[in-house]
Image (tube, rainbow, N blue to C red):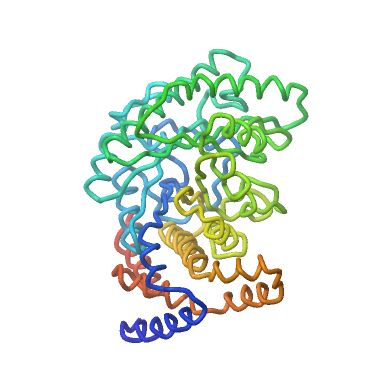
Amino acid sequence: MNTNHINQIYNIAKERYASIGVDTEKVLDQMKDFHLSIHCWQADDVTGFENRGEALSGGIQVNGNYPGKARNIEELRSDIECVMNLLPGTHRLNLHEIYGDFKGKCIDRNQCEPEHFRSWIEWGRDKGIKLDFNSTSFSHPKSGDLTLSNPDRSIREFWIEHSMRCRKIAEAIGEAQQDPCILNTWIHDGSKDLTVNRYMYRELLKESLDVIFKEKYNWMKDSVESKVFGIGLESYTVGSNDFYTAYAAKHDMMITLDTGHFHPTESVADKVSAMLLFVPELMLHVSRPVRWDSDHVTIMDDPTVDLFSEIVRAGALNRVHYGLDYFDGTLNRIGAYIIGARAAQKSMIRALLEPVAKLREYELNDRRFERLALLEECKSMPWAAVYNEFCLRNNVPVGEDYIMAVEDYEKNVTSKR
């Protein structure tokens, strides 16, 4: 796109927003502090580097076999660097434990150490990318249907040890980067059919979590994540939303809201203000559920826009962390990253450009017509011109120009794998 044309359109947008009391330059400054935690597992369809040959399990499924997925740590890092270079702003990388630098050795989940992520820490320092982390309970011989809630003590202790080691790894990452590493704990535990031991499994999960989170750290933050169900585990989920909401509130912990982990008619946006009254912070895993937790590529749909709008309206910018969580092997994986990340950024910039003060004034004075009218007008305001200016100032492709950049990377890199 023509630089002068982008600037001209932005200046018109700047004046238009000023007329409703919004400072676009302030919004562009705020966008500098909007850091997405990019999920590493889109690049290789959640394979990781354990070299076990295990198929995906634990209610997780990736569709598609588009050519060029990352096959090793070098290729995955190359893909992530490509993604980061096509996004405005600075962003983080979210790692699952199975993405350790195991150097071809078979390191079991209860043997993982900070040393297995030392090269990731060095890579992040070199590239200016900070890291977040996840324990990994799926796709393992001891996964089965139950991990931390398993009545078999030996299996339960295996996963407790894994989870405790993941917290130590997150602490080492956070200390090295001098910025807290967020560790997300999610397990797939559940039942395919009816169960009569719901209370027992949840009691075991609570006991396991109490052991895991007993030690306090300075450079990592814990977050717990619920789910409605997994493939093959449709009838019962031990770590439900009610369970983790109560656990996080009781222990003053962060909770993760994955936009695919709720019933289709639920509004995840509505949960923001409800939860922030009782927990210190929120972690988002932004995905796109199509009828269920299908992990489609994030787009700028109504639920995503509503989610980011509610964060801004709640004045919660400093209490929410933002991550992506989808995996689609049916299309160019680098392109999938860019589509999803830019959709999240666009949703945030739209939210920041909303005249919240004026809308609140209307609402508090029971001026319902004016409130609804302004909300409707905001939908057609020139927010895209502000986002394009953000891209331009960050020296990344503007608008659809990134498509050519992704195609060039495919031609020169991923198509040769």
Name the residue rendered at 60%, 66% in the picture.
Answer: 360
Of all residues, the one furthest to the top in this rendering is 153
Of all residues, the one furthest to the left in this rendering is 126
Residue 83 in the image, given as x and y percentages of width and height: 36, 58
In this rendered view, identify the residue nearer to me: 247 or 233: 247
In this rendered view, identify the residue nearer to me: 179 or 41: 179
Horizontally, residue 39 falls left or right of residue 154, namely left
Name the residue rendered at 42%, 53% in the picture.
Answer: 36
Horizontally, residue 247 falls left or right of residue 106, namely right
Name the residue rendered at 31%, 82% in the picture.
Answer: 3
Residue 152 in the image, given as x and y percentages of width and height: 60, 14
In this rendered view, identify the residue nearer to me: 357 or 244: 357
Total marks drawn?
0
The image quadrant that residue 311 belongs to is: bottom right
In this rendered view, identify the residue nearer to me: 404 or 310: 310
284 over 118 or under it: above or below:
below
4 over 73 or under it: above or below:
below
Residue 160 in the image, given as x and y percentages of width and height: 49, 21
Can you say which quadrant of the picture contains the N terminus?
Answer: bottom left
Horizontally, residue 398 falls left or right of residue 320, namely left
Name the residue rendered at 38%, 21% in the picture.
Answer: 111
127 over 137 or under it: above or below:
below
Of all residues, the one furthest to the front in this rendering is 365
Residue 405 in the image, given as x and y percentages of width and height: 34, 68
